Image: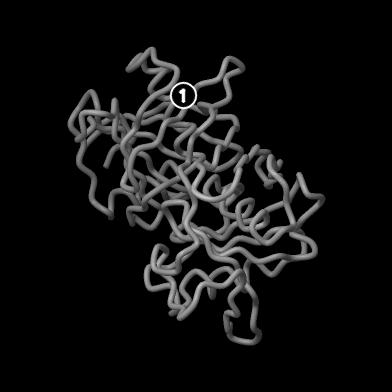
Amino acid sequence: MMKLEFTKMQGIGNDFVVIDAYSQPVSLTPDQIRAISDRHFGVGCDQLLIVEHATTPEAAFRYRIFNADGGEVEQCGNGARCFVKFVHDQGLTQQREICVETARGLIYPRLEDNGEVTVNMGPPSFLPADLPFEAETIQSLYPLQLAHETVEVAIASMGNPHAVQLVDNVDTAPVAEQGPQIESHPRFPKRVNAGFMQIVDPHHIRLRVFERGSGETLACGTGACAAVVSGIRLGHLVSPVRVSTRGGELNIAWTGGDSPVWMTGPAATVFTGAIHL
């Protein structure tokens, strides 16, 4: 049996178990990750984050992201903010802007004076091959056939894949019914995160996201970025955009084209503890 220390964190309700593999060797199996993530038998989280030594000289740290089902994913915006607070709280760095290695590449999160964290999420991609998504041409919206209906989705990659649809009201949107169908739709060979976006005005949206491998979460940072860039591209939104989720609010800015998406929001430590595996 192994005793593993952890820190429980959350970014606008998107919650994480953070493991320090920078100061100590840690190796977890998918079964162990699922056990830690289980809300009834483990600690409980949407994703598990592992902080490691970087493998590239430019970066100060590497961090890896695992969904509650044990699968590793490329990027997580709320997790990136929690990561910055974690390495500062643990005294692993004094730098306010950090170069961090992820499976998607390098990101540059910055700790602001007010305690919030701004993350350069990199430029979005709307190319079907980058998600991947099976489509013959590049379109603004794609029809997606579900079990009992066809929906129109905008696709975007923020290092991980997103399919975003416009809805009249996120409170009544069929997230529980359509979310699993979109997530595992055969046109998305590596599955996809399904976003449901309600436009309040050109600078404000409400959003719910059914996340790949985790189900609906209270917030999704890359989902907020994907929704905003999709809305800007469709002509419905103007940067910057306030994104209201069930867990709280994020601010997203994007000037278009190949420019990066900037995300600002809070991150908080909930508690620390140890679990026996």
**Residue 183, x across and y down, in percent:** 49, 69
Q: Is mark 1 on a helix, strand or loop?
A: helix
**Residue 223, x across and y down, in percent:** 56, 52
Could you say which quadrant of the image residue 93 lies in? top left
Is 95 positioned to the left or the right of 201 in the image?
left
In the displayed structure, 127 sits above or below 252; it is: below
In the displayed structure, 215 sits above or below 206; it is: below
**Residue 227, x across and y down, in percent:** 62, 55
Taking the spot 31% from the left edge, 47% from the top edge, the residue there is: 103
Question: Which residue corresponds to mark 1?
Answer: 85
Is 235 positioned to the left or the right of 74 in the image?
right
Relative to the observer, which residue lies in front, 35 or 48?
Answer: 48
Taking the spot 82% from the left edge, 50% from the top edge, the residue there is: 201
**Residue 266, x across and y down, in percent:** 59, 29
**Labels in figure, total:** 1
Residue at the front extreme, as displayed = 257
Q: Which amino acid does label 1 sit on?
A: Lys
Relative to the observer, which residue lies in front, 211 or 6?
Answer: 211
Is 207 positioned to the left or the right of 146 in the image?
right
Taking the spot 59% from the left edge, 40% from the top edge, the residue there is: 13
Quadrant of the image for the C terminus? top left
Could you say which quadrant of the image residue 143 lies in? bottom right
